[in-house]
């Protein structure tokens, strides 16, 4: 019987729960003996010209062996923006700032010490003289034509990239609509805040090769990024990935700090190590989201949406990283699961004097869902219709053949209406509305809000010509064990468990006798890593394919061993052996076929395209109308990721994602003051979610397989952050809708909620029917 689809316990957990993980900072390796420690001196100002940086006093401090500034690294290439050709390449980042600093936290110098904690003290002795420039923190201000501040004078603009034809927006898009609503929505900046901060351990061997231990999401991508920054051949770099304590999109590739540590090790001829503090992580690791969206939605009073427009302004932060590209993904997914008559979307990315923005769980797709789901609710409120009804009226009908959207996305399979109905039924939607009506009628202080979101997302969006792909190697050893090499790079997703399940299912080798390896570029030179929820549908499919191909190699050997025709042999995974049809006694175990010669297969699985998981979320909140406090009472979700291979892991992914998604709606925000000083640079100020703020999640099942891989699987890793955020935001606004509140920007903090209520009651007194968020 197949173990696929069963709740196999995570094989990773016993070690994590007993001896604990081995993270980069924990690595004990003789190659790192005598390592020095690197500490980064960071800019305390958001925007300034650097007059001088004097490290002489720091050099005299105890334990200091060296100190370097940008001038010492002048020969190294800059960190170029990704997506060459799309994003302004005149906005590249030096590894250590040279002439100017552009955000608080930008590395300007390094102090190298014998002991780990000497650097922080010595860094205070680095004398950097800054000539302050006016900062631009607000993305709209940065985008304004002729705005006062240009971050890169040579570029002459703050616009890092433009997407879509802004000049081609149709003046008549909303003609004929009975009702049209437009609003600016903020999808605020958040910090990924992984439990493990960034780190590096680096050593150069006598042959000139670099070995670097870095927590990452794909060693091969990290190797490429690091080699580019160091100006060396990627073949001269070996990346080793230790345990990774969370990444959420922000540990893809490599950052300037990683390259500087490697450069220091080379320059000093001594291994070097770095582990950042939480404060550094919050100000200098890439942030996520940071979009300002203008939505316009129009349609008929029967609930049909005729037209939708999304205009995106993306804050890329001080240097364009992946964040500058996010509008492309937001535009791709702009209409979500809806069959709008007409839709347009355009975007621009601008640089500001803030931390660079990168990928964060969902990267561009949560922003698309948040915009359209808010727009639907605004439209529903405008025409006075139940938001569930408006969704029902506009969802695409179920389809099994690929559906191409106006934005060029090819949705593989979907049944959005069923997802919505399942979620509404599981939530007991009508009972919730009845309860709400009672509380409204009674004028209760604590009001009930019900929020919906429907979504479709893209997973596994590979850029490779010919289709997204991943490799896998499967080897069966003579002792009956097996080893899998994968190009994916788990950091909490449980690939060791599921990849072993997939091989076990084909080979009949028990899961606990299969070892899964990843993240060493000498062992696995190629691989796409883990992001965009691509791993199972491409990497897992490759493991299954390699296992099947291995059975065919083994069949030939078994045929010789049994002196039989290969076509007459059947492989029985239950016995782990080949037998001759009709003569079960004539059999040979798989492992025996690995005695004379290695039994190993490497394969590449290529998918016809990305897949499009979908779902519907219902959030139930209570909002205290006197204090503005929001309590998330229930979260009911349908997340259809096609065939589920391990429900335990898929549910774990949903739980983590829902928590993170909900947190954006009512808790998290990375804030700056007007001068660009971070206001949330510690966990005392940055309120990431804990278990106390969320209820137990109610997960309903739905599985619409894809034909794009033999597993039928789509991605699940980001579903929660895509569906939960707008559901919770909509619920909070819904709780206050009868009081005249139409919109509250995220995070719906008590203060924001309270202000929205105040301005709604003020507007009501003044005779207007609509409130503004304060
Ligand atoms: N799975 C399954 N059936 C499916 C889909 C997935 O059983 N139909 C299982 C897979 O086998 C795998 C897990 O669910 O064990 C997630 O698989 P998949 O959806 O392929 O996503 P990835 O493994 O590629 O994970 C990436 C995704 C992303 S993009 C971010 S960001 C993210 C996330 O996963 N960051 C995480 N989950 C995280 N979880 C943890 N603990 N830490 C992070 O940093």
Image (cartoon, rainbow, N blue to C red):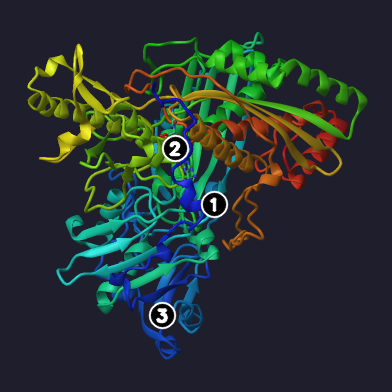
User: Residue lying furthest bottom in this view?
Assistant: 60
- Is the residue at mark 3 in contact range of ligand 1, meaning its CB lies under 8 Å from it? no
Q: In this view, does 691 lie above or below 561?
A: below
Location of residue 30 (image quadrant) = bottom left
Q: What element carries label 2?
A: helix
**Which quarter of the rendering shows the N terminus?**
top left
Q: Which one is in front in this view, the residue at disc 3 or the one at disc 1? A: 1
Q: In this view, does 243 lie to the left or right of 565?
A: right
Q: Can residue 515 be seen in this view?
A: yes
- The structure residue drawn at horizontal position 32% and vertical position 72%, both measured from the top left corner, is 32
Q: Which one is in front in this view, the residue at disc 1 or the one at disc 2? A: 1
Location of residue 260 (image quadrant) = bottom left
- Is the residue at mark 1 in contact range of ligand 1, meaning its CB lies under 8 Å from it? no
Q: Is residue 319 above or below residue 542?
A: below
The residue that disc 2 covers is 327
The residue that disc 3 covers is 52
Ligand 1, seen in the image, is in the quarter at: top left
Q: Is mark 1 on a helix, strand or loop?
A: loop
Q: Residues within 10 Å of mark 2 (few under 14, many from 20)?
A: many
Number of labelled discs?
Answer: 3
Q: In this view, does 595 lie to the left or right of 170?
A: left
The residue that disc 1 covers is 191
Mark found first going from the N terminus, 3 or 2: 3
Mark found first going from the N terminus, 3 or 1: 3
User: Residue lying furthest front in this view?
Assistant: 585
Q: Is residue 417 left or right of residue 377?
A: left
Q: What element carries label 3?
A: strand
How far apart are labels 1 and 2 at the CA level? 18 Å
């Amino acid at each position: 019987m197949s173990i696929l689809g069963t709740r196999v316990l995570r094989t990773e957990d016993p070690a994590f729960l007993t001896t604990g993980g081995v993270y980069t900072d924990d690595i004990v390796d003789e190659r790192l003996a005598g390592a020095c420690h690197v500490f980064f001196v960071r800019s305390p100002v958001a925007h300034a010209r650097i007059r001088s940086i004097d490290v002489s006093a720091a050099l005299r401090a105890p334990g200091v062996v060296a100190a370097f500034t940008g001038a010492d690294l002048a020969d190294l290439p800059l960190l170029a923006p990704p997506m060459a050709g799309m994003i302004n390449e005149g906005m590249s980042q030096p590894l250590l700032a040279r002439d100017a600093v552009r955000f608080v936290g930008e590395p300007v110098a390094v102090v190298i010490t014998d002991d780990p904690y000497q650097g922080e003290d010595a860094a205070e002795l680095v004398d950097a003289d800054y000539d302050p420039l006016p900062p631009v923190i607000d993305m709209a201000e940065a985008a304004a034509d002729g705005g006062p501040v240009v971050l890169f004078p040579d570029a002459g603009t703050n616009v890092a990239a433009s997407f879509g034809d802004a000049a081609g927006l149709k003046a008549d898009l909303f003609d004929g609509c009975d009702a049209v609503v437009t609003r600016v929505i903020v999808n605020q900046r958040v910090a990924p805040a992984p439990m493990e901060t960034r780190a590096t351990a680096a050593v150069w061997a006598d042959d000139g090769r670099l070995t670097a231990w870095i927590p990452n999401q794909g060693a091969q991508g990290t190797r490429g990024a690091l080699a580019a920054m160091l100006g060396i051949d990627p073949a001269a770099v070996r990346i080793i990935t230790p345990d990774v304590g969370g990444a959420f999109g922000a540990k893809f590739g490599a950052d300037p700090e990683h390259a500087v540590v490697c450069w220091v090790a080379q320059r000093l001829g001594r291994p070097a190590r770095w582990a950042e503090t939480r404060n550094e992580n919050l100000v200098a690791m890439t942030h996520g989201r940071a979009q300002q969206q203008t939505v316009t939605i129009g349609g008929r009073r029967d609930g049909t949406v005729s037209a939708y427009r999304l205009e995106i302004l993306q804050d890329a932060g001080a240097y364009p990283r992946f964040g500058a590209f996010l509008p492309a993904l937001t535009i791709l997914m702009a209409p979500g699961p809806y069959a709008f008559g007409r839709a347009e979307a355009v975007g621009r990315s601008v640089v500001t004097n803030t931390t660079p923005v990168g990928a964060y769980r969902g990267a561009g797709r949560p922003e698309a869902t948040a915009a359209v789901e808010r727009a639907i609710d605004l439209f529903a409120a405008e025409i006075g219709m139940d938001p569930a009804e408006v969704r029902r009226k506009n969802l695409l009908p179920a389809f099994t053949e690929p559906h191409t959207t106006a934005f060029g996305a090819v949705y593989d399979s979907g049944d959005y209406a069923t997802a919505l109905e399942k979620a509404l039924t599981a939530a007991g939607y009508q009972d919730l509305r009845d309860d709400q009506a009672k509380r409204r009628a009674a004028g209760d202080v604590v009001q009930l809000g019900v929020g919906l979101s429907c979504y479709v997302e893209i997973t596994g969006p590979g850029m490779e010509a010919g289709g997204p792909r991943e490799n896998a190697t499967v080897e069966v050893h003579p002792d009956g064990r097996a080893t899998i090499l994968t190009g994916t790079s788990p950091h909490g997703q449980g690939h060791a468990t599921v990849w072993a399940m997939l091989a076990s299912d084909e080979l009949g080798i028990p899961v606990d006798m299969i070892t899964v390896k990843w993240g060493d570029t000498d062992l696995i030179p190629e691989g796409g890593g883990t992001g965009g929820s691509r791993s199972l549908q491409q990497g897992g499919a490759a493991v299954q394919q390699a296992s099947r191909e291995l059975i065919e190699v083994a069949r030939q050997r078994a045929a010789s061993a049994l002196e039989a025709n290969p076509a007459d042999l059947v492989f029985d995974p239950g016995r782990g052996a080949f037998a001759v049809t009709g003569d079960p006694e004539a059999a040979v175990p798989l492992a025996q076929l690995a005695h004379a010669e290695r039994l190993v297969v490497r394969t590449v699985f290529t998918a016809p395209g990305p897949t499009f998981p979908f779902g519907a979320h219902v959030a139930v909140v209570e909002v205290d109308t006197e204090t503005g406090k929001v309590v998330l009472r229930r979260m009911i979700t349908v997340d259809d990721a096609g065939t589920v291979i391990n429900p335990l892991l898929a549910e774990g992914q949903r739980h983590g994602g829902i928590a993170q998604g909900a947190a954006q709606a009512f808790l998290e925000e990375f804030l700056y003051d007007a001068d660009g000083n971070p206001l949330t640079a510690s966990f005392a100020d940055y309120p990431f979610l804990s278990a106390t703020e969320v209820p137990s999640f109610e997960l309903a099942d739905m599985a619409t397989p894809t034909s794009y891989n033999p597993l039928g699987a789509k991605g699940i890793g980001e579903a929660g952050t895509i569906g939960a955020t707008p559901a919770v935001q909509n619920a909070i606004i819904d709780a206050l809708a009868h009081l005249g509140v139409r919109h509250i920007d995220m995070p719906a903090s008590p203060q924001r909620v309270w202000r929205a209520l105040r301005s709604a009651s003020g507007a009501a007194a003044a005779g207007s029917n609509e409130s503004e968020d304060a």
